[in-house]
Each structure stands twice: as C-alpha cells, then as structure tokens.
C-alpha cells in the first residue's frame, strides 16, 4: 500500500489598515525571483478560473513548503516541481537562498514578519535522517513525532494548535476532522507566514464614509470608503492603461502595491502581469502628494490546489505509480493526495490584517490629485527592497 504524504502550508499576514553565515545576496534573489514567477503563474490561472470573484493567496507560503517537498523528490517528480516553482537548479543556491531569506526575516523590524516551518512525522516511520537534517538546517523545519495511526484526532489537534499559535489565532482548525488517514498518513509539512504592520500614512477613521464601488459600468455596490486626512506623500505612477499606487507600512520595507486599470476591466492588466512588468512599474514610481480613497474590505478564500498545480505541470507527485519522493524514505511509496490553501485578509484605516493557510494532503488651496480605488484592482504585499511577494490578490467586489 502506498503511503500518503500530508503536506500543510500555513501563512498569515497581519497589518493594521534564518541568519546564514556569509549569505550570498544572489542566492536570496534567485529564490525571490522563483517565488515571484510562480506567484504570477498561479495568479493568471486563478484569474481565468475565478473570473468574477476576489482572489487572495500567499505564493511564499506555497513555494516554501514545496521547496521542502522538493528536497525529498527525485527524478521526473523533482523536475516537475522545480519547473513549476522556477526553483534554482543548483541545490546549494536553493538552500542558501531560503536559509538566508528566513534569517533575514528574523531581524527586528518596525513590523512583524515571521515564517515558520515544521515537519510532523509518523512515529517509528523510517524517514531518511539526511532529509530530516536538511529540512531542519536550511528551512527550520524541525521534525516532531506524532502517532497518526493510533491517535489521528489528537495529532490533528496538535497541528491545528501549532498553526493557530503561529498565525496569532487567525487560522483556526485548518486540518479538517477526518483528514488524517491513520492507515496511510506518514508526514505532514507545515509552513506559516505572519505579517503585521501599520500604514505609514494611515487613513482617518472619521473620514470613512459609505460610497459606491463600481464593479462594472452597470453594476455597483456600496462599501465603506476610507480617506487620508488631506493629501499625503505616496509613491505613484501612471501609464496609458493603469494607475500604480504604493502604500508603505511603517519601516518602509514592506508595502502594498495597488494596480488599478483606467477602465473597469482587469483583463488587459492581468494579461500584462509578470515579474518583468512589475519591476518596470516599480521603477516608474515617484513621490506625489495624493488624496487616497481606498475601500475597507474583508476577504476569505479556500483553494483546493491539486488540479491547479497539475495545470502548472506538477503531475507525477499525485500519482501513486509515478511519484518519486524517495529522498524522504529511500523508497517510492509516498505521494501527495490533496492540497488546500486558505486565506483571509481585512483592510482598515490602520492597516491590513490578512491570513493564509495552504494545506497539501498526500495524504490644501491647490488642486489635489486623487487616487480613488472605486473599481476592481490587483494588490500585492511585498518587500520593497527585494521585491519578494508575500501576498497577491484581486479585489473584484469588496462587498462580497
């Protein structure tokens, strides 16, 4: 009987609206570029799949967990994962990049940004020590023994508690009852990403008023529209097709990029979304005094990702007869069966509160310029210096 691999990724971003010796910046950038290319691949897939809906996910959470899975993949299975996630082919670049990235995130900031990984292994199952050692050393994923066979429910509660603690209670019970198969589940990989920051230019709560958000020329919904207290300095740019606004969080290292088309349609913008264009648009940003109007919104999404990743080229890892995860246990008896990615975000006057979880079962007297986000737009929460995308989403209907 093939054993199921249960892989869980959890990420949380909250904002109110691993230290390597001699780290190589080029290795960190290789990992960041891989993450960002995957972010846009998945976004394009979701923009077609969910045509008239909001979108929100964390590419860093998903790619981090699959990097750990990749460490145990071999042959064609490893190549599929590497290509779909654009991972660097050199293993030392991959490992140093993730280690350095994680350690950089641990340094004290004016905002909170933490990433945590963990392995939960079936007690007594012969996982390769080399695999467990690599994941702990380079990804911080320390292995904890659980008894999935005799106590699946107790194991589930332990993992859920870990996730809730890492995401400050924003992701509750991400592992559903009955999801751990006592006969086949051998490993669970978890990832959590947490971000909390305050807007550098907060909105004035007294100025928040009901207004219309125009989904299309024919359809509009009422939302609570926030407003800055007078014009504030923002990074801003325009093209013939779109408005680009950057709203920084305190510390000026993390920001939200807002990409809003001039018309009501996101189709043309989404067709242009890629890593190269994002770098070009970021390079166009200049300081400008703006009155900004931005909708308060809450969004909660759950994605089942097996079919999505198959469309991105990862196929064999889900097939018992073809999956090669022999780097985990020395045998070809593990395969992935289900993947869930759950996300949650709330944007208010002080900042942004957002959470994401991915579960993979394998088992004054002058003219004031205004930016008014009153029709569908794309938003990206990223590191300004490195460009690393933590979260990406689309607001199609903030009242939904």
Image (cartoon, grey):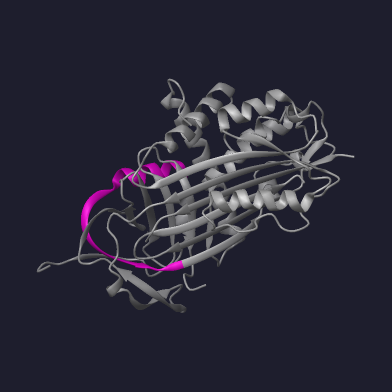
Residue 194: where, in percent of width, then height?
A: 49, 48
Between 77 and 140, the one lying in front of the other is: 140
Residue 273 appears anywhere in the view: no
The answer, for residue 54, to whether it is visible in the render is: yes
Q: Give the range drawn in magenta.
A: 274-297
Please indicate whether residue 9 sits to the left or right of residue 266 in the image.
right
Q: Position of residue 324 (x, y in %)?
A: 77, 32
Foreground residue among 238 and 335: 335
Asked if residue 323 is positioned above or below residue 20 in the image, the reply reads below
State the quadrant of the N terminus.
top right
Q: Which residue is drawn at 39% across and 56% down?
A: 259
Is 292 magenta? The answer is: yes
Q: Based on the displayed image, in which of its 4 quarters is residue 334 positioned?
A: top right
Q: Is residue 284 above or below residue 81?
A: below
Q: Which residue is drawn at 46% across and 25% down?
A: 20
Picture coordinates of residue 388, whole percent (x, y) = 44, 41
| Residue 376 placement, left or right of 144 | left
Is residue 357 toward the left or the right of residue 335 in the image? left
Q: Of 330 and 42, which appears nearest the observer?
A: 330
Asked if the magenta segment contains residue 308, the reply would be no
Q: Residue furthest right?
A: 1
């Amino acid at each position: 009987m093939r054993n199921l691999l249960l892989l869980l990724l959890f990420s949380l971003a909250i904002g109110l609206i691993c230290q390597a010796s001699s780290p190589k910046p080029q290795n960190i950038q290789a990992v960041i570029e891989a993450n960002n290319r995957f972010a846009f691949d998945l976004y394009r897939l979701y923009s077609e799949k969910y045509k008239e809906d909001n979108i929100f996910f964390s590419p860093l959470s998903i790619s981090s967990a699959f990097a750990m899975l990749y460490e145990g993949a071999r042959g064609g299975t490893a190549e599929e994962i590497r290509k779909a996630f654009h991972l660097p082919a050199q293993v030392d670049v991959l490992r140093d990049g993730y280690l350095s990235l994680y350690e950089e995130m641990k340094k004290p900031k004016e905002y909170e940004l933490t990433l945590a990984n963990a392995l939960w292994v079936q007690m007594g199952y012969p996982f390769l020590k080399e695999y467990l050692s690599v994941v702990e050393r380079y990804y911080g994923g320390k292995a904890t023994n659980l008894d999935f066979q005799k106590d699946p429910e107790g194991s589930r509660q332990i993992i859920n508690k870990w996730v809730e603690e890492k995401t400050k209670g924003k992701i509750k019970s991400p592992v559903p009852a009955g999801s751990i198969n006592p006969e086949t589940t051998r490993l669970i990989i978890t990832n959590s990403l947490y971000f909390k920051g305050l807007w550098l230019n907060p909105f004035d709560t007294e100025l928040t008023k009901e207004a219309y958000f125009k989904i299309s020329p024919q359809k509009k919904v009422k939302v609570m529209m926030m407003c800055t207290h007078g014009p504030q300095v923002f990074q801003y740019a325009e093209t013939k097709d779109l408005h680009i606004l950057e709203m920084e969080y305190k510390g000026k290292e993390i920001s939200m990029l807002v990409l809003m088309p001039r018309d009501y349609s996101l189709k043309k913008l989404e067709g242009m979304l890629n890593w190269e264009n994002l770098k070009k648009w970021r390079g166009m940003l200049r300081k400008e005094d703006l009155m900004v109007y931005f909708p308060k919104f809450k969004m909660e999404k759950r994605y089942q990702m097996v079919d999505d990743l198959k469309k991105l080229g990862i196929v064999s890892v889900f097939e018992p007869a073809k999956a090669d995860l022999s780097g985990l246990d020395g045998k070809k008896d593990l395969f992935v069966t289900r993947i869930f990615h759950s996300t949650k975000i709330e944007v208010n006057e002080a900042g942004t509160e957002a959470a994401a979880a991915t579960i993979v079962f394998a088992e004054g007297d002058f003219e004031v310029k205004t930016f008014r986000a009153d029709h569908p737009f794309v938003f990206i929460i990223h590191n300004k210096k490195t460009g690393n995308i933590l979260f990406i989403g689309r607001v199609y209907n903030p009242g939904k």
